Each structure stands twice: as C-alpha cells, then as structure tokens.
Image (tube, rainbow, N blue to C red):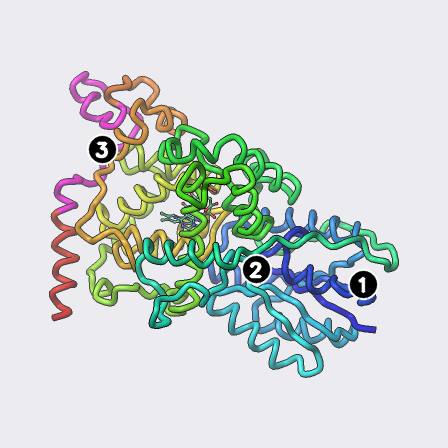
Amino acid sequence: MSTHLVWFRADLRLHDNLALAAACRDPRAQVLALFIATPQQWAAHAMAPRQAAYIAAQLNALRQALAEKNIPLVFHEVADFAASVEVVHDVCQTHGVTHLFYNYQYEFNERQRDAAVERRLTNTVCQGFDDSVILAPGAVMTGSQEMYKVFTPYKNAWLRRLQAHMPECVRAPERRDAPTVTAGETLNFTYPQQPFDAMLFPADEKAAIAQLRHFCQQQAAEYEAQRDFPAMEGTSRLSACLAVGVLSPRQCLHRLLAEQPEALNGGAGSVWLNELIWREFYRHLLTYYPALCKHRPFIAWTDRVRWNPAQKAFIAWQKGETGYPIVDAAMRQLNETGWMHNRLRMIVASFLVKDLLINWREGERYFMSQLVDGCLAANNGGWQWAASTGTDAAPYFRIFNPTTQGERFDKNGEFIRRWLPELAAVPEKAIHQPWVWADKQGRTLAYPRPIVDHAQARVATLAAYEAAKKSEA
Ligand SMILES: Cc1cc2nc3c(=O)[nH]c(=O)nc-3n(C[C@H](O)[C@H](O)[C@H](O)COP(=O)(O)OP(=O)(O)OC[C@H]3O[C@@H](n4cnc5c(N)ncnc54)[C@H](O)[C@@H]3O)c2cc1C
C-alpha cells in the first residue's frame, strides 16, 4: 500500500490545495499531513508575532478539518530549515512514506530546503506544485523567454495566457476510509505570538471563503472607486489569508469571475483582478531574480545612495511620531492591527526613504516584523517600488508629498482622527498641518512638530540619488 505525506507550509487549507488533492487522489493510499515550525528561521526573517499567532490559529483549524477527513497531522518544531530536512526524512522513514507532496515556495531559502529534501529522500517519490499562484512562474515570459520587467506588458501577456489556459480549482478531499482521527490538543510553537483581531482577519478557512464571497458580491465592483481611501472599508482584507495560504489565488479569481463576469474584459472587478496580477508579478520576479530574496536592489546603482543612519528619525517613523498626520495614523494602524491600507503603505514607505533618506531595507524589515500579511515577494516589491530601486518602480524623482497625499486620500481627516486622538481638537481644515493651526491659535498640542521639512528633504534626496546615479558612469 502507498503512504502519501502532504507537507503543509504556506498553504493551510483543504480547498483548492494542489498537493493535498494529488495526495488524496488514490482512495487506497494512506494519507498523512505534516507541518514543521522553524522559529529560528522565522526570526531571521523578522516574522511578525501576529503572523505567528495567525499561522498557529490556522494550523489548528486545518488540523481539525483534516481530522474530519481522517487525515492525521504530524507536527514538529525545529530551529531552522536545515533541521526540517531531517524531520521530513525521519517522518518518511517512520511512516514508510512512498510519496511526498508539497506546494512550492518561491523564496531562495525555501527552494534550497526543498532541493535538499528531494536529494535526501532517495526512496520516496517527491512531487511539487505551483499552488500559490494562478499561473506558474515561467508561464508568462517575453518572446525571448525573459521575465517581463514592466508590469503592464506582463499583465497583458498574463491575461492572454490565462484565457488560453484557465486553471480550475480542485475540490477539498473526501473523508477517507481510514481509522478515525481525533485532532487532539492545541498545537503551538515557541515563537513569540501576539493576538490578531479575528474580526479583521478570518480565523479559519470557512470564514475566509465567506469573506471572499462577500467581497466579490458586494464590494469588488466598487473597488476601483474606493480602494484609495483608507477611511473606507474598500479593499478585501484577504492579504493575510493569501499570505499563509488559507485561500488560494485561484479561488479568488474564480469567485471574482462568478460574481463579476466582466472582470476579465476590463469591466467591474477588473481593478481588483489587477492586484492579484501584481501579486503574481512579484512572485514570478522573485523566482526569476533570486537576488531579490537577499534584498538586493533591482537597479544596481541605487545601492550607492548614501542613506541616513538616523536612528531617532527611524524610531519616530516606527512609532507614528513624525508630525505628519497621515504617516503617523498609518503607522499606528500597522502597530495596533498588523495591517495597513495599501495607499498608506506607499505613503509611509515613500516618507521613510525619500523624506528621511533611510535605507528601504530598514522599512522592509520593520514591516515584516509587524504585518500579519507579511510576504517577502509583495513586501520587497512594495518597498523597492517606493524606493525607486525596483523593476517598474516609481522613478527616483517622484517623491510623495505627505501633506498633499493626506489631503487627497483622507480629505476630512476621518482616518487620521481614528488613530490620532491627540488631534481631536484640531478643526477639519487644519488636520493635515496641525502645527500651522496651533501656532496661529497660540496653542500647544500633545503631538510632535514635523521631524523633517518636506521641501528641504526632497532636495537632499534628489541630490543623494543623483550622486549615486552619476557614480555609475
Ligand atoms: C511598501 C509596501 C509593502 C507591502 N507589503 C506587503 C506584504 O508584506 N504582504 C502583502 O500581501 N502585500 C503587501 N503589500 C501590497 C498591498 O499593500 C497589500 O497586499 C494590501 O494592502 C492588502 O490589503 P487587501 O487584502 O485588502 O488588498 P486588496 O486591495 O483587496 O487586494 C487583493 C489582494 O491582492 C494582493 N495585492 C494587492 N495589492 C498588491 C500589491 N501592490 N502587490 C502585491 N500584491 C498585492 C494581496 O494579496 C491582496 O490581498 C505591500 C505594499 C507596499 C506599498
């Protein structure tokens, strides 16, 4: 009899899980599941304690759901990836595993680990799947078989490819004809954990599917009009589910097309589809350019920018005490919930890099340490976009003005007031420059003055980037 082992990593779900479905295809096979926590590895990547708590919750829900299918989940905790290779080997030996099934992860260390596992398992057939993307890396290439470096042509090619090869979702496995499995005690790992808000991030697969359905039915058509305004609930808030694999992007695609059939033709819902394609773009890039995983910039000369080592300013940014209300409200949202609206991610990233001239890698790491949806590809892509070091990034001379960004995207200061109670007394029209108002009134505020003058910072940043660019010649 064959014994199939499904190694779960960032794919904590039953539905549309390619590795799980393949492992369960033969009804006679015995099926086991495995999850390995690697706290030391997670710490090296500054994984947020909120994300660790999210993974723990999803893992327990998955274990219960697997038990209902009579699939036992084996859990181990080891320090790092090197040790996890040995665990997989030992589990295969102990249980006489004939076939190992897993879904690919595209980050450099993860790929090295998987290659090591495949080398180590000489008596086990190993099969990997492109599960965390709609189209596999390598499926969307230029005519000369290169990875696209610019998003729009990539997107057009991606859509053409999708229409020619629409991937279907696979079903959750049937209950297996095997001894009854009980889920057992709650699993946990030693990594620090911080509670996440289950109202904001679906606590299990069922809740995630319900949230996806609700968004696609009720909100996707309005997404284009609402997505840039952080005071509105205009986006799906599914990023944490997608990051740890409680939902697959194929489920998102098919639910969107079921509710908004014109999304593929540029109609209602197409802007949301665009975001799913950005997600794929960054994942494909990471696979094609593994140096991105080592935080190398895409544009080499930007590595010569002389960054400001200012620790005080960096801490003020982290705490949301820069004196720029939109930046501070955003950072407090991040610190308190583990999530930040996309428009605000762009604003605070631009502020850190282009107003404070602090190395984008510091911001990238800080985001990872806080985000419940932290994901290397999207986070690195977002930071390199904002810092103008990435492929198809904002040009280096494009510098957001944090005051006018606030005025445009949080006109009445509704979002700012939600996160900065110390500005409660400031009238609506003054909310984006509270100190200008306070000085005129002869008042003091329990809120910092701007830590940097935007106009001066802009000039200094342009000079720093231009000096780096010139030194290339
Ligand atoms: C500096 C910076 C850092 C970021 N870090 C992360 C990160 O660590 N993890 C993460 O998932 N996203 C990251 N993003 C992308 C984006 O901000 C979030 O995906 C989005 O805000 C999540 O909210 P949502 O689920 O409501 O998104 P929606 O607007 O509903 O979008 C749907 C899904 O598409 C994907 N998506 C949306 N926008 C992007 C994008 N620009 N790039 C890649 N994928 C996208 C996400 O999976 C998201 O859940 C970052 C963006 C910036 C500018």
> Which SS class for mark 1?
loop
Which quadrant is home to the N terminus? bottom right
Instruction: Name the amino acid, label 2.
Output: Asp
**Whether residue 50 can be seen here:** no
Return the x and y of residue 243 as percentages of the image width and height.
52, 51
77 left or right, relative to 447: right
Q: Is there a contact, CB below 8 Å, between mark 1 and mark 2?
A: no
Q: Quadrant of residue 210?
A: top right
Q: Which residues are magenta?
A: 431-458
Q: Which circle's residue, 3 or 1, is located before the other in the chain?
A: 1
Which residue: 47% across, 47% down? 371
Instruction: Using the image, tell me which numbered label, if any, was put on residue 131.
Output: 2
> 231 and 138: which one is in front?
138
Instruction: Using the image, tell me which numbered label, if any, was put on residue 404.
Output: 3
Q: Quadrant of residue 180?
A: bottom right
Instruction: Name the amino acid, label 3.
Output: Thr
Task: Decide: is 156 above or below 289.
Answer: above
Residue pushed farthest front? Answer: 164
Instruction: Name the amino acid, label 1.
Output: Pro
